[in-house]
Amino acid sequence: MRRSARTGQAVEPTPSPNIWNWPEVYELENRAQDATGVLHRAVESRCDLRDRDVLDVGCGDGYHLAGLARLASSVVGVEPYAPLVTRARRRLSGLTGVEHVDVRPGAAQALPVESESMDVVHARTAYFFGPGCEPGLREVDRVLRPGGTLLVVDLDTGFSPYGDWMRADVPALDPARIEDFFAQHGFDSASVVAEWRFDDRASLQRVLGIEFSAAVAARAARSVAGTSLHVGYRVRTRQKPHGLLTNVTERS
Ligand SMILES: C[S@@+](CC[C@H](N)C(=O)[O-])C[C@H]1O[C@@H](n2cnc3c(N)ncnc32)[C@H](O)[C@@H]1O
């Protein structure tokens, strides 16, 4: 098991077979995910990125980095899976206006950035933030400046039918326990329903195929007519206090 030299914490990533094994299909998923812009607006209204130093933790192959970089004064993407670090850097090398973006190998439990150097920590579909992620939350508290924001955009495991499919494959997923965890750790959470809109049925089926077991993906595909579906998200924010009482261990 890998451990952080600084904190001694285990820094094993949470397996993410969708993007690790099928990044091209995950790209289709990312493109489909917010057809009406409702998620984008939910993020914007909760967290001002203008002229901020932003960390995108679990940035995958960097899909969201350029969008964050449009407003932020600097962006650091952190990703534990080496092939995705390479892909993210390659993506950026083909773009303009991203000179202030850097991609670094690392994990939420041991972030490769200075203490109190970030205004916003952003994490999108970040399975590594949930019950048991206290080491990651402590790291976020370390790297955020006082008054900074942690923003986690995650799938709502309680929203039908997508959440039902997730729980069919992973029965241990417990929406109420997840909500309790985030509430106990001082998060404000809001529900957002986004439309996933694909160009064609084949793309929709390929994406379902990387998210679910074969049986659940087949059931999901049968129950979706056409090329779009509605998926629930929880947009969660947590402010690092301006005062001294910031350590998550005091709440756990
Ligand atoms: C579902 S993907 C989402 C990628 C990206 N945020 C996006 O929206 O395109 C989850 C990502 O989290 C990364 N990850 C898993 N465990 C992690 C950890 N402990 N710390 C940081 N990232 C982690 C995975 O390698 C994967 O790239």
Image (tube, rainbow, N blue to C red):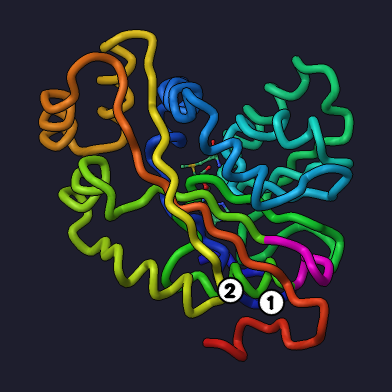
- Looking at the image, residue 240 lies above or below residue 106: below
x 74%, y 24%: residue: 92
Q: Which mark is residue 7?
A: 1
Q: Residues within 10 Å of mark 1 (few under 14, many from 20)?
A: few
Range of magenta residues: 142-149
Left/right of residue 182 with respect to residue 157 in the rendered view = right
Q: Is residue 145 magenta?
A: yes
Q: Is residue 156 magenta?
A: no
Q: Quadrant of residue 236?
A: bottom right
Whole-number angstrom distance, CA of label 2 to CA of label 1 = 9 Å
* 112 and 126: which is toward the camera: 126
Q: Is mark 2 within 8 Å of ligand 1?
A: no
Q: Is mark 1 within 8 Å of ligand 1?
A: no
| Dots 2, 1 in contact, CB < 8 A | yes
x 18%, y 59%: residue: 171
- Name, please, the residue furthest toward the bottom: 250
Q: Give the mark nearest the N terminus, 2 or 1.
A: 1
Left/right of residue 123 with respect to residue 234 in the rendered view = right
- Name, please, the residue furthest toward the top: 200
* 129 and 182: which is toward the camera: 182
Circle 2 sits on which residue? 135
Can residue 74 be seen?
Answer: no
